[in-house]
Amino acid sequence: LSPQWGCVDNQPVIYYSEFTSYNVRIGITDMEGNARTVFNLDGTSVGIVPCQNEIIYCRSGIIWRCYYDQERNKRIHLPLIKGENTCASPTVDEYNNIYYCERGTIRYYDRKKDRTQAVLYKGYYVAPSYHPRNGSLAYARRINGVMQVCVCDCAAYQEKQVTTSTYDVYDPRWSPCGSYIIYANSKDACVYVHNIYTGITYRI
């Protein structure tokens, strides 16, 4: 579940969540398929954002942060965002503030002010993905009863609908370059790529 691009030692990697018989854990693979486990914790860990000095992830409806404590020589896991409902799909902006979804809305957590506010709430929204190069959020929104991929300019909060599928599409993610969005389509359970500049979409 929930693949996410990352970079380790200047090489591209993909983070993902996988089911076991007792939990959902987070793993990582390089482009040659060499996979290993990152977090193997109790509960359901879906959605991860590797940052410079920490990792933001979702576990069992709570947004957590993880960092390495040099003095104690161990990883420290701390709950960061607890909502009244399930919080999911964290994505981080260039200031290390966090967009996430909760009960069909997309919220923004300002870490310095320790304050959360709803930024997209006039409808049903899930799975935000932020890209710092273009300052935009990609997400899935229910439009006329069907989940579609949309993009929002976070400076002006102007929305553009990207897909016009007759089937639900979901889990959009930006490419590292910020020119493409990948998403899943419920029609065939396959992954598609959309070029935001040319409008060309193809299945991979």
Image (cartoon, helix red, strand yellow):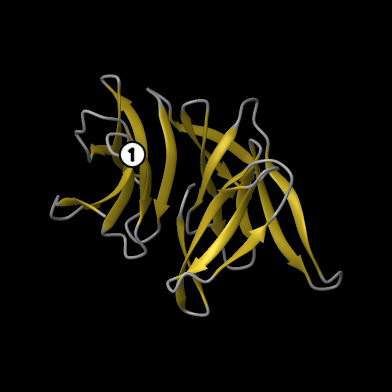
**Residue 94 to residue 103: above or below:** below
Give the structural element (helix, strand or loop) at label 1.
loop
Q: Is residue 17 left or right of residue 195?
A: right
Q: How many marks?
A: 1
Q: Is residue 183 left or right of residue 104?
A: left
Question: Residue at coordinates 42% horizontally, 48% vertically from top-left?
Answer: 129
Q: Is residue 173 left or right of residue 79?
A: left
Q: Residue 130, how many percent across, how many down?
A: 41, 51
Question: Residue at coordinates 52% horizontally, 80% vertically from top-left?
Answer: 9
Q: Is residue 21 left or right of residue 31?
A: right
Q: Is residue 89 visible?
A: yes
Q: Which residue is mark 1?
A: 157
Q: Residue 127, how many percent across, how many down?
A: 44, 40
Quick one: label 1, few (<14), some, or many (20+) residues within 10 Å? few
Question: Residue at coordinates 60% horizontally, 54% vertically from top-left?
Answer: 26
Q: In which quarter of the view is residue 71 placed? A: bottom right
Q: In which quarter of the view is residue 162 placed? A: top left
Q: Which amino acid type is marked by label 1?
A: Tyr
**Residue 60 to residue 194: above or below:** above
- Which residue sits furthest front? 21
**Residue 7 to residue 67: above or below:** below
- Which residue sits furthest top? 145
Quadrant holding the C terminus: bottom left
